[in-house]
Amino acid sequence: MRYVTNFLALASACLIKLGSADAQVSTAIFESPILSIPSTKLGDQEYLNIALEWDGSTFFNLLDLGQENPTPSKSPAAQYFPQSKIFKIQSLSISGRPFRNADFELNPDGVLEFLSIDQAYSEKYSTISVNLEDYPQSNNPALTLQMITAIDLNADGKKDILAHYWHNNWNAGADYYGQVPNKLLAFVQDGDWSFSPATEEIFGTEDVNLAGSASRKQAVGDFNADGYPDVAYAMNREDGRPGVYPGTPNWGSLPVVILSNGDGSYSVTNPGVENIWYHAVAAVPNELGYEDVIYRPISNGENALAYRFQSGDWARITGYPKIDGWEMQATENIIWSTDVSAVELFEKDESGWAQKSKISYPASNEEVEVLTWNGDLSNQYLRNILGKDRVAVAFSESCILDEGRYYVTQMDSRLLPQDWRDYDNVSETSMEHDAPFIIFEYRNGQLTEASELFSSQLSERHSYRYICDDLNYDGLDDIFVSTLDGSNLLYLQTNENKFELQSELIFPSLQSGSGGQWRSVYEDIDGDGYVDLLYYSNTPSTYRKEVNFEIHWGR
């Protein structure tokens, strides 16, 4: 039986108390004629699962008031403002498309009349297709796209795309030292939300090979002080071939920097000659007004490999600190480093770089024999972190927030089954993936773990990549996560310095995917001041022309 419309009486008796978010922000869903709202703030009380019925014009009647929430959140999907009689839905999904700020006015009859709504993204989205002949040529069908760079190559205020494709060598033996089939493609953004292939235009050739290797990480900076952005890559040949131990020399490669020529064209350069397994790279502002390139050292406890472009060529430079980590992020005065068991912070002052703080997560004395993803057997020490037994622990990504107030890493790990001691070895791929974010605050010269700043997490969603930036333009850095399952997660920082998980429905869904794995880039691509969402295929097909990229334009 339909409810008598009692929204007016209920709402008019309430006073709204706004608060900060402490849980995942929910999203309302409209499936004609029903508008379902998971949480609604009416005064001091929150109601769950309110249902409104659309009458086909601009009016919505209360169908179901739902039930009271005994533990109200601070981030309801909707709120009623009694002074203005405005009922506002923050986030609304209509037929899979995200909208923001849907406003309704409560009339004297107790009926909500629709007033306005903001589109989160333009109705138009763009796609880029890649032809088979544009891929690196190989008999191995295991093509992968790891590194995507949104970068303004031609200084027109719009970001273009660099995409590095390479083939796995799954069947290569441990004695294989050959190249990784790879190719870098460039796409330049036109003025109508479209992209044109521009590899030959930018590089002078269609066949751009990055040191015969796979790209691991990248860092963007102006490394030759010409005003154009450049891209430094950490390269290796860890492409599925079994490693030669110790040191895995068959995984070694040269480092690569895509360096601007100052006229909109670019060249592939090698800043160093050390043929090693490169894993991390960072761009560090120097005293000359541009950036140095630093890589993780050859072995733990050595000084970072640092290069500076000067007098028309690359030069090895000294002065950077000893670093143990596999991952690095940097600012002018800070290097943030993470590895399998510790996080480390370096600062630069008048006397140079020095370690300021380090937090370790030591292993136990108990070993676990693990069958790794590439078929190798690996003896790994058991670690208990955040109250769970883990192996394959590594702080896989990292970033710096709010100019060094906070530091974030994602702890990649595998959770051991309870009966793991009953088996000769445990398969890495059969273990549950757990990858929680750990956040650190830097206070009084020391790092302090502050993971309570995350109101909630989806730790089973291991990230493929994540970024830290002010994504809602409120002066506070946020965290966007592109996950291994193709979904997008957004943690917005509140004024109370909590990181609040947003509803996944705030993102537009992929429209043109043709199977495989998809990843995301979340930044302002067209230069209009609104964040855009770029989907790209991590496992494109080598058998047909297909959509590799889909860009949804933020509004």
Image: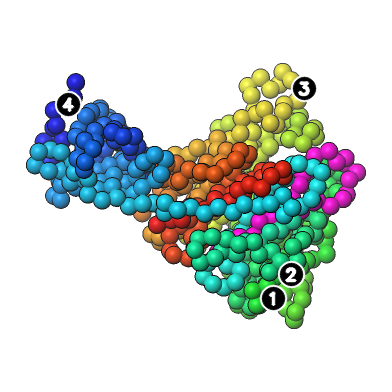
The stretch of residues the image draws in magenta is 159-182
Helix, strand, or loop for circle 3? Answer: loop
Q: Amino acid at mark 1?
A: Asn
Gap in angstroms between the C-alphas marked 3 and 4: 63 Å
Colour style of the rendered protein structure: rainbow
Task: Bin the neighbour count of mark 3 within 10 Å (Cα to Cα): few under 14, some 14-19, many 20 and up.
Answer: few
Task: Bin the neighbour count of mark 1 within 10 Å (Cα to Cα): few under 14, some 14-19, many 20 and up.
Answer: some
Residue depicted at x 74% and y 52%: 133
Residue 290 seen by the camera: no
Mark 1 lies on residue: 261
- Above or below — where is 339 with respect to 386? below
Query: Disc 4 or 1, which lies upstream in sequence?
Result: 4
- The disc at residue 3 is 4
Query: Disc 1 or 2, which lies upstream in sequence?
Result: 2
- Residue 433 appears left or right of 96: right
Helix, strand, or loop for circle 2? Answer: loop
Mark 3 lies on residue: 424
Query: Disc 3 or 1, which lies upstream in sequence?
Result: 1
Point out residue 460 in the picture as x, y percentages from the top left corner: 55, 35
